[in-house]
Amino acid sequence: MSDNTSLLDIRKMRILQAIIDDYIMTAAPVGSRTISKRSDMGLSPATIRNEMSDLTELGFLEQPHTSAGRVPSEKAYRLYVNHLMDSAKLTDDEAEYIKRHLDTRVHEVGEVIRQTAKVLSDMTKYTSMVLVPQLSSMKVKRISLIPVSDGTALAVVVTNTGVTKNAMIKIPDTLSPDDIEKISKLLTAKLDGHRMSDAIESVLPMIREEVGEQADAVCVMLEDIERSMSETDVEVVGASNILDYPEYSDTAKARSFLTEVETGNYLQKVLTDSSDVEMSVRIGTENDNPDMRDCSVVTVTYKAGGKNIGSMGVVGPTRMDYGKVMAILKYMSSSLSDILSKLLK
Amino acid sequence: MSDNTSLLDIRKMRILQAIIDDYIMTAAPVGSRTISKRSDMGLSPATIRNEMSDLTELGFLEQPHTSAGRVPSEKAYRLYVNHLMDSAKLTDDEAEYIKRHLDTRVHEVGEVIRQTAKVLSDMTKYTSMVLVPQLSSMKVKRISLIPVSDGTALAVVVTNTGVTKNAMIKIPDTLSPDDIEKISKLLTAKLDGHRMSDAIESVLPMIREEVGEQADAVCVMLEDIERSMSETDVEVVGASNILDYPEYSDTAKARSFLTEVETGNYLQKVLTDSSDVEMSVRIGTENDNPDMRDCSVVTVTYKAGGKNIGSMGVVGPTRMDYGKVMAILKYMSSSLSDILSKLLK
DNA sequence: ATTAGCACTCAATCCACTTGAGTGCTAATA
DNA sequence: TATTAGCACTCAAGTGGATTGAGTGCTAAT
């Protein structure tokens, strides 16, 4: 991505910023007079017009039609996010709000995740999403196999971070409940401290001799479990918020947005793809999903014990309040990380 | 509820039915000419008009304004559902579709529930909802307590029907993992075959002496577990379908519908309230939630082992295709019951 | 009892006109 | 030379009157 700043002198930048700020608030094309009055640069509308004309030529502004004002282009938002935006600080009220609503006395990770998504969407008024913590990267502390019926058992994996996950698995009919308990204990003993993802390659060989003839069965079970563990799951809240924004007053557009969000596929993809960068911003067509081509998606990662274990984000119209959203996300990220780190001690 | 049929002669009924059928399809006020042509009763528009005038007076039809056609009232839908509607049979294609999509080789209840909701919404094109099976009414087969971290453990309850549910519970710091395992085995032994809801009253006393000084701790744990078990959870799919219906082309209306559905509170209430009647239909203002006052909600229960264990339903505009919806729900109910009965053997 | 005929109603659509916010260009100005 | 005032031009969004057409209700004829 080329750095566009060099093309723009300081005045053009300030004007562009003013236009974007205004457009983010009003969703209406902004004209030269508005900027002349609102910005304290003491320039006449005519001068602003000239600059706007240049900015249009450079691809930062667009005109819906000749006699409307100008609308920021995606390129403009990109510049805004990278250079212009004054990364808003949260007000005390906002920080307080987050603290209060996140500090419910919950001791279950799923609950914390849901609550986080709720707070995120309440504060931003956009759609929020939180990826549940990824287990595959955590170390196993315990594996319990619980017989459910002939041929099936529930595997419960507890990680060193205290996150748990279930997997319903098939078991050979030949195994008795006692066998299962034995295997369960053995797995816990051997896997303790290892990553689930390493289980099959590095740990299975060690177990092999001890389980004897059941080695193959155990192997299949482990594969089953690992598959379940690497399933990700995403909590989405506030999808219908999108209807509050005029750009989605067209029902068909709202429909395709909501359908996409409801399945959650794309959002999940974005969150997993971004789960190694501290903060990511996808503007409009930077989203490769056509139904999301006039949304922006902002994500951050969250940690537990100093290690990234998940990500969360916000989806809204391209004209979203990036400054506010990014500030909130940053704050929420560290709050959630704190809570989880404590919770998962 | 008084039975309105007596007020209407056979001809009025047929005309009303024709009007409702037409309105369900078109969502547009229907006029006398349409009915005269479409119904094979060989009556002129003028005659129909006279009858329509009577039906309006009786409260079965409404006029948006003088020169529009007529629209069925809620009272009309009620009559339709109770007496008029020819309870549509599913086509072979539809039955086939359900069979194929529900028969995925899944062996986990949650998966089946999600799939059911999906199929239900795909077929009806409305919003679907499925209440996950209620554990409190099932008999316990096994309880496992799995230590997660100091002070917390995961309780996994397996019922005789094979449904499982987790609850994260607090445990006294004084309990060692060995203690926990002992309690876990004891609970399984004592609770096996009992309903969770009876656990505290009838089973706890029997355990009391065996656990000695930990009796109070066990009691608290059981309460914790029981609370978690009686939590209901509802799977909602296809909320955005509502946007395809002209009565929700107004964004504000769609917004309030979607927000209500997103929280799921009301739907959950309806499903639990209806979980003892085979089929229930709530039309328009029969819903006590103001945001749902121009929707209808249809629910059925489903069983496992001959016993009601949950319910599911469909939400759509009052002008929904009751015949089709009810036929689909009936069929799905028995399909799901079959699957669960087999699955949970 | 039914229907043909007719006057009446009223939302929806169309069209011509106006309004007003905004542009782009040019000539005057500092 | 950069800025600005002035002005003609554009175009979406109203505004208001006329037209249309689907529908009704009533009355008189069948």
Image: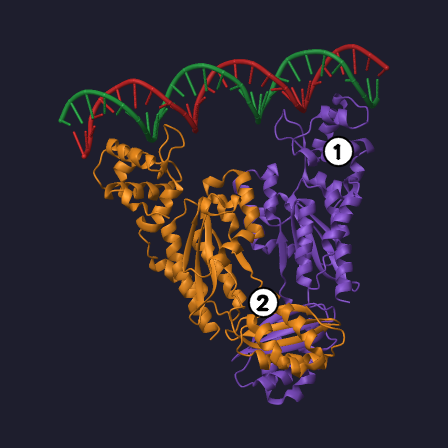
Chain colours: A purple, B orange, C red, D green
On the image, which quarter does residue D7 sit in?
top right
Question: x, y (%) of residue A66?
Answer: 63, 25
| Chain letter, disc 1 residue | A
Say if residue B25 shows up in the picture: no
Name the kind of residue labelled 1 in the image: Leu
In the rendered image, which residue does mark 1 sit on?
A16
Q: Nearer the viewer, residue B292 or C14?
A: B292
Q: What residue do we see at 72% from left, 46% from top?
A: A325
Q: What residue do we see at 66% from left, 44% from top?
A: A125
Camera-near label (1 vs 2) is 2
- Report crowding for label 1: few under 14, some 14 to 19, many 20 or more residues within 10 A (C-alpha): many
Query: On screen, B160 above or below D25?
Result: below
In the image: residue A274, left or right of residue B82: right
Q: Which mark is residue A341?
A: none
In the image: residue B15, left or right of residue A106: left
Which element is circle 1 on? Answer: helix
Question: x, y (%) of residue B268?
Answer: 53, 56
Q: Which mark is residue B229?
A: 2
Question: x, y (%) of residue B99?
Answer: 41, 64
Name the kind of residue labelled 2 in the image: Met
Are marks 1 and 2 in one subunit?
A: no
Which element is circle 2 on? Answer: helix
Q: Nearer the viewer, residue B13 or B94?
A: B13
